[in-house]
Image (spheres, helix red, strand yellow):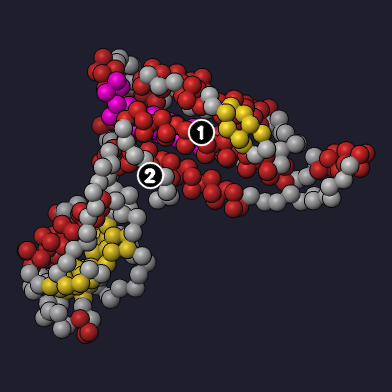
Amino acid sequence: MGRDVTLYPHKASRKELKDYLENLGFKKCDHFWHWPKGTLNYYWFDYNDFKSTDGISADIYKIRDEEKKYTDNEWALHVRARFIASWHDVKMFNEVLRNAKKIFGGIIKGDYGTNRYAPLWEDSSTPISRGTKYIFSTVSMSISKIKDALPDAQLELPKTKGKIAELNTLIEKNDPSRVIYNGLVPFAVSMIEYFFSEIFCILIKYDNFALQKKAIHKQKIDFGTVLALQNQEITIEEIIASNYTFQNLNQLNKAYKEWLDIDVRKILYKKKKIGKKICFLEHRIAKIIEHRHGVVHHFSLDDTLTKEHYINILDSIELSMSEFINFLERKYQIKIDRYFI
């Protein structure tokens, strides 16, 4: 699904169309679709300020016999933007076609009829809202995949009471699947680390409080880091973030307090129902991180960790992300979409 439109130029060579796309910043790429021999496939993506969600593709191809009714020209330009394309992607999609038609003439055919372009909508997004949406959807997609792939217990014993129930509980503690659930705890913590560290980097790039602090901030960096900055392999924000450990709730909170005047622990200090229990999110996240520390550094496996309990861990992370996003929406007066990209 998406937006598919083709320009049939009045007069344009393959090289002219190629130069046109490359001058707009398009990069050559491979394509899964079967195109006629000689086709050139291109891709465009705007990395600045999280403007693109999917980018757009453009293909220069030799027209088929059934398309010769539109033009006598040998080559055509096909442009596509998927349904998840951002407002900026669709704007570029239209500009590529509109400007190409002005230069090369011809006729446009596609999803919107003849010589018509993709409709644009009102866009109120900001770099913070777009960046946060990307990070949130990335983690949420991973959580969804893990829930679908999580194996069931291998020892499914009947529910009983009394001494038999105690024996079954003891047997179930030796279920091999519980080793797998424990092994996935560090992966769950990596979601927490990724979510809060990446959003931290986004916020300190645009937040006024952080911008003022950056203007007076002093930090020693080695020559290798200077070269990485020069080669755009690392950002100023990533260098600042490297001063903190986001797998530690105290360190995570310190980073946000010092650079953004945001108290993450306070935001998460809310009671939520997780599984069959009601608990504070802040306490729950702290315990998950502590569990990860035991697994990684001491090989301390919790033999009571069931599939249901691990799903509760994932639910805790989802609730924490949502609470934090709710806070950002209020603080910055923005709307952050919460669907998978």
Q: Report the side of 187 relative to 251 (left or right).
A: right
Q: Distance between the residues labelled 2 and 1?
A: 16 Å
Residue 296, position as x, y percentages in the image = 63, 31
The residue singled out by tag 1 in the image is: 320
Which mark is drawn over residue 47?
none
Front residue (pair 21, 85): 85
Residue, x 12% and y 79% (percent of image)? 71
State whether residue 269 appears in this view.
Answer: yes
Is 9 left, or right, of 136 in this rendering? Answer: left
Category of crowding for the residue at label 1, using alpha-carbon neighbours closer than 10 angstroms: few (below 14), some (14–19), many (at least 20): many
Q: Which residue type does callout 1 highlight? A: Ser
Evaluate if marks 2 and 1 touch, with contact meaning CB atoms under 8 Å apart.
no
Mark 1: secondary structure: helix
Residue position for label 2? 337
Q: Please tell me which residue is depicted at 39% across the width and 26% down the height of the picture.
A: 241
Question: Magenta segment, which residues?
Answer: 191-210
Q: Is residue 19 covered in magenta?
A: no
Q: What element carries label 2?
A: loop
Which of 251/156 is in front? Answer: 156
Relative vertical location of residue 149 with respect to residue 250 in this rendering, above or below: below
The kind of residue on which mark 2 rests is: Asp
